Amino acid sequence: MSRRHPIGEPEAFGKVAVLLGGHSAEREISLMTGHAVLEALERRGVDAHAVDAGTKVVASLIEGTFDRIWVALHGRGGEDGTMQGALETLGLPYTGSGVMGCALSMDKLRTKQLFTAAGIGTPRYWHLRGSDDFAAALDALGLPLIVKPAHEGSSVGMTKVERAEDLPAAWQLAAGLDDCVLAETWITGGEYTASILNDSVLPLIRIETPNTFYNYEAKYFTDTTRYFCPSGLPATTERRYSALAMDAFRLVGASGWGRVDFLVDGQDRPLVLEVNTVPGMTSHSLVPMAAKEAGIDFDELCWRILETSFAGGGRGTATPGDSGERGHGS
């Protein structure tokens, strides 16, 4: 669990690296997120610098003598605990979840196994190891279903399957990106997201898209997706869904900030899809939208997320006010 460490002056953060880009399938979105965050921090007077997470990122961070890191990396190599582990080794405090929270959240199979064990609703699923699993998955889940790589974000590699003969191609697409592929039962119902900042769940957002599902294009580049914040849910229902989102967030060991996505089926049951430990911060992104509804503008949101680098929780830490000093990995 994390708590807010309010910082009053930008100098208290020291020299900040905004870690962006990288080599994942979500590089384009990470660059958009990182530059938006960088500009917001600069507007608030923070000594912030963009660092692309290329092959020499560790050397760049050491040579840059940074005091803390705003992690703006999406996908593998940045959101899966890999970079967080490197930052731990360097003793550099960083924003958001630690190694375990990032690694578990990025693994959709193990996340769903945890949800199931803990009694948190999630769509029924099948681990597709290859063609020998296709018939069993279809028998168990029926049609339509959705096929997805277990370790990608932003709906990369996902396919809705409405005919049995289309399953092999969907699996091939996902398997080309990941050794672990899941099939999930298709849920027809409302789509919601819960943004989390420290120990608070921000106002829920209801999502409507004319696309087959809320895919990569709908998330970042089209203007046809509709967002409702406030969500329009009754207050008691919103509180119940928010509590569920926080339970899922904490279950996987996430902390600081993030987002929990879920669907509500025809029986009004909320079914958690996944936990995102480094959500997008672009013009189409959901966390800034929810924060705005809560009275937190974009620049303040980026500031508060940077404050999470003081939270600790088994990773590089520093005491507020220790400008110019490296945190110590625990």
Image (tube, rainbow, N blue to C red):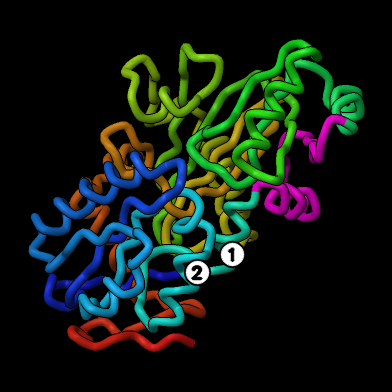
Q: Earlier in the sequence, mark 1 or mark 2?
A: 2
97 left or right, relative to 115: left
Tell me the mark number nearer the camera, choosing from 1 and 2. Answer: 2
* Up/down of 117 relative to 322, above or below: above
Please tell me which residue is depicted at 46% across the width and 17% down the height of the picture. 209
Q: Position of residue 275 (x, y in %)?
A: 56, 48
Please tell me which residue is depicted at 45% across the width and 61% down the height of the picture. 199
Can residue 201 be seen here? The reply is no
Q: Position of residue 135 (x, y in %)?
A: 90, 24
- Assess whether mark 2 and mark 1 are in contact (beta carbons under 8 angstroms): yes
Would you call the spot at circle 2 few (<14 residues within 10 Å), some (14-19), or many (20 or more)? many
From the image, tell me which residue sits under label 2. Answer: 98
Task: Return the mark for residue 253.
Answer: 1
- The amino acid marked with disc number 2 is Gly
* Up/down of 122 relative to 116, above or below: above
161 left or right, relative to 292: right
